[in-house]
Image (tube, rainbow, N blue to C red):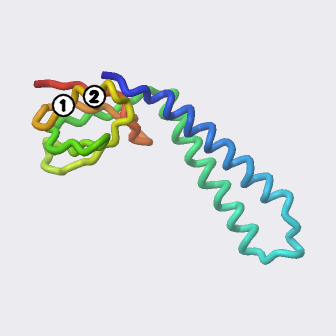
Amino acid sequence: MPLKPNKTIYFLIIICLLQLSTSVARLFTTEFQLMPDFIGFTYFLTSLVFLGLLVVLITDLITKARRTIKGRIINKEGNIIHVLRDDGKVKRYKINVPEVLEVLQADYRVEIESTNLSNILSRITVIE
């Protein structure tokens, strides 16, 4: 059951580009004689953070590398499922696709695929 990860990645890329452009514009248009140096440094740091996020998202979009996790659904609350992984850890996943959420039930064994770097869900497969 695909979860439309490209739609999520494109949305996050657009948000990241908008934030990066406003940070860079603010960095270059600020009158630094009237402001302390730490404010300019803060604009520079936010620009670097958004640039890093943009690189991670674009890398996930281009490479199509996926991470696979197997486990058992132990709880379902609204649009959040709790999965007990095979290594014994409990992981929480938010499912935004109603068609997929209706199929999933507690005690189902599932295989979850997510993007490699940003860990955005891309597919859930019911094994048993």
Which residue is denoted by mark 1 in the rendering?
110
Q: Position of residue 31 (x, y in %)?
A: 88, 67
Query: What type is the residue that disc 2 sits on?
Result: Ile
Q: In this view, does 38 lie above or below 70?
A: below
Q: Is residue 126 above or below residue 44?
A: above
Q: At 22% across and 45% down in the image, what residue appears?
A: 82
* Label 2 crowd (10 A; few <14 / some 14-19 / many >=20): many
- The Cα–Cα distance between marks 2 and 1, rounded to whole angstroms, is 7 Å
* 36 on left or right of 102: right
For residue 2, what is the image quadrant? top left
Q: Where is residue 38 in the image (x, y as percent from the top left)?
A: 72, 74
* 8 on left or right of 52: left
* 95 on left or right of 5: left
Q: At 75% across and 67% down in the image, what residue appears?
A: 40
Q: At 49% across and 27% down in the image, what residue appears?
A: 6
Nearest the viewer among 95 and 40 is 95
Per the rendering, the mark at residue 6 is: none
Which residue is denoted by mark 2 in the rendering?
124
